[in-house]
Amino acid sequence: MTTDVVPGLTPRPALSRSAAFAEAHRCLMCWDAPCIRACPTAIDVPGFIKRIAFEDDLGAARVILEANILGDSCAHVCPTSVLCEGACVLNDVDGRPIPIGRLQGYATGPVIQGGVQLFSAAPATGKRIAVIGGGPAGLACAAELTKRGHEAVVFDAASEPGGLNTRGVAEYKQTRTAALAEIAWLQEFGVAVRPNTVVGEDITFDELLGGYEAVFFGAGLGAIPVLGIPGESLSGVEDALRLIEAVKTGALAPDAFIGKTIVVLGGGNTAIDAARLAVRLGAVRTVVVYRRGPDEMPAYQHEVAEARREGVAFSFWSAPHSVIGDGKVEAMRCQRTAPGASGADGRPAVVTSDEPPYDVHADVVVRATGQATRQSLLSELPDVATDGRGRIIVDEEQRTSQPGVWAGGDCVNGGKEVVNAVAEGMAAARSIDEELRR
Amino acid sequence: MADLGVNICGIESPNPFWLASAPPTNTGDQIARAFDAGWGGAVWKTLGEPIENTWSRYSSVDYNGNRMMGLNNIELITDRPLETNLAEIEAVKSRYPKNALIVSLMVESNPEAWHRIVRQAEDAGADGVELNFGCPHGMSERGMGSAIGQVPDYCRDIVGYAKEAATKPVFVKLTPNVADIVPPARAAKQGGADAISLINTINSVTGVDLDTFAPRPTVAGKSSHGGYCGPAVKPIALHMVSAIARDAEAGTVPISGIGGIATWRDAAEFILLGATTVQVCTAVMHWGYRIVEGMIDGLSGYLDSKGMASVNELRGKSVDRLQKWENLDLNYVIKAHVDQEACIGCGLCYIACNDGAHQAIGAEREGDRTRVWIIDDACVGCNLCSLVCPVHNCITMQQQDTEHESLTWVEYGEGKGTLEPRPKHGVTITAE
């Protein structure tokens, strides 16, 4: 395994046949395999890996996609080292778990990217389900419903469906082209998508509830809200998701940050994605400013370690004070913070220090401080209950408090992985199917 | 450093590592490079009447991602002119007087042909000749190779022809494609053989191309059975070597062991079961002549660790340890033991025991991992769990204290002694 001297925007290449074969043969095929339990979609990992080992690559892809219809995306974007690969028993032998994610991509790539259809839909039931949001949760739900013979229609506000898969996954993890190919594969299979359709504007909830037997709500989260600090409207202040999307669409050139200093605000995985992306766009200096310490960062430790290896600097216990500049960003002014008493979540409260703020030179400031919930959209569904943080409340089958409405993905879990969204979307589809067949 | 030098039927060799008669010994240039690398001896690829080969000649069996677990070939004897081979034999022997150089021979079954070829090989300077009674493909269709080795009377007669002309030792290379290796070995001895080489390759078809339906190696869409060799055949070879070594008559003839030898450990096993020299082919076809360096270092280090000054001290030490089953001790009780600290919780031992053996391992999820345990009174000590366990020394087989003296099947049949309590059988299925 080589590390690029200069990290690029291209995702790691697929495993070669020889490498996949060798790695597949290392799999022990555990009893009660912990990798399966660690996967939110419970993919039969030893099952698909042994199919690769036995030279049945299509069989491997079928095992994966049966459990996780977006298995190709997940192969690239899953934090495998904290999921399946983190659970692999070989960690205890030599610290070299089976590269499950890469093997998964080896199997699914030729199928999804090559447009090979493996499944056929069950006989048509004549039932129609409206799916709100064409992100991973909605697509997974719609695909599973299609497979079960229902007519699922995905309503998506954007011109291209896919949600964060198309727009929000850092290009160096999975390309936009690959994500779109996966959606094309789903559409080829029979998933109907209505792009450019804003629910609440182009079509009302009542129309959906009236015209369809069930509704799945998978609209995800909203934009990253402004912080409300001085200077935030200066040219050069970006939102991490818009930055990631601009790179994916080509709106931002791959050399856009050469010679520049980038300050990223936030400590979550999106902040790390943005920082690692900045490095790849040529930034000479990338600084993540986070108001708590390294132990409190919500970002995955392995991602933080990768970012550090790539030269990303961290300024902990620092809160955004204001953006300094004349028309355009010149510096990020930060206020020192300190840990206070532990809060309900076990993390220390953030206490702002009395010290005078300090400035970090910046050409671009990227906001990665968390997405808002879709309050305005949800307000149109008054019977769907949400919790104190605006997340939709569901039961174990993803049913909301409103009969006939299921929900899943970021709007329910507050913002987790693609694989969690897929798991919830597919669980909802199974529940809807069962309900509609009653 | 222990002395690796050996003497087999009067032929001195600086070490027991020889190249078998095969593609690696096809030319003088190859053998010279092999001797430079450290090989003690070589058996020149079989000389005989002119033949022509097909192109596609080898095919292999891969296992769990490893290449060439077994190798199969349909190549015939040398396809180079006899004069060229003889001239090169002379050149090699003059440049490497201390290395053992044996020439493999195969001609039609008449005394004159054998006399002529034996004399030609000896005149070229060979230290001895090896009669190829083993090749199972191509040549056997023409009444040579394994067609001889499979009929003890032919073996005896043809060894006799060779011995009539030979002034130097005659090796006989036997085919494993027989029900019992001992009769041809005895026949070779009766014919006057000075040494026995075995095994030659095993009749094989390595596989079929699932797209074209042509077996491998494919020659214009068809194939022919070949001879199988490589790591996969080692256990078969060890058995046949030991069967001859244990035989009162054939066992007096020195043995050059062949079959899947790739490491010093393999060589040591053949020597323990009675071989004086070992011959290597597939491993060299896979990795080149250089592997002999590790074989020399490994064997001499091993002899040092055993306090043996010479490899000759090792020879045959395990021959008497192979017995008929009826002489094994029924009261030798061992049971599996799991080192819970070393266990990684893969559960392979549980699956293997439960599905493939005697249902003597329990397993359950404990927190995030699998915990296994041995059900002592069901464990028959079969070793399977220790064989499948991927962690070194995690499952060990431990001898148990017993009440009764050792007891063989023979003694038990005679009503002697007392059996130790036997293990309990697993789950009993009922009709409902």
Image: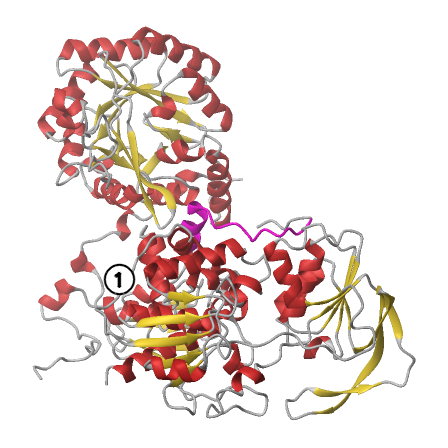
Q: Residue at x 39, y 39 (%)?
A: B262
Circle 1: element type: loop
Q: Which residue is mark 1?
A: A120
* Residue B373, horizontal then vertical, whole percent: 36, 78
Identify the chain of the residue marked 1, using the numbered disc in the image: A
Q: Residue at x 58, y 81 (%)?
A: A373
In the rendered structure, the answer to whether residue B140 lies left or right of residue A305 reads left
Corner quadrant of residue A426: bottom left
| Residue A94 magenta-highlighted | no
Corner quadrant of residue B240: top left
**Quadrant placement of the N terminus of chain B:** top right
In the rendered structure, the answer to whether residue B258 lies left or right of residue A324 reads left
| Residue A21 magenta-highlighted | yes
Q: Residue at x 49, y 32 (%)?
A: B290
* Residue A215, horizontal then vertical, whole percent: 39, 81
Q: Residues within 10 Å of mark 1 (few under 14, many from 20)?
A: few
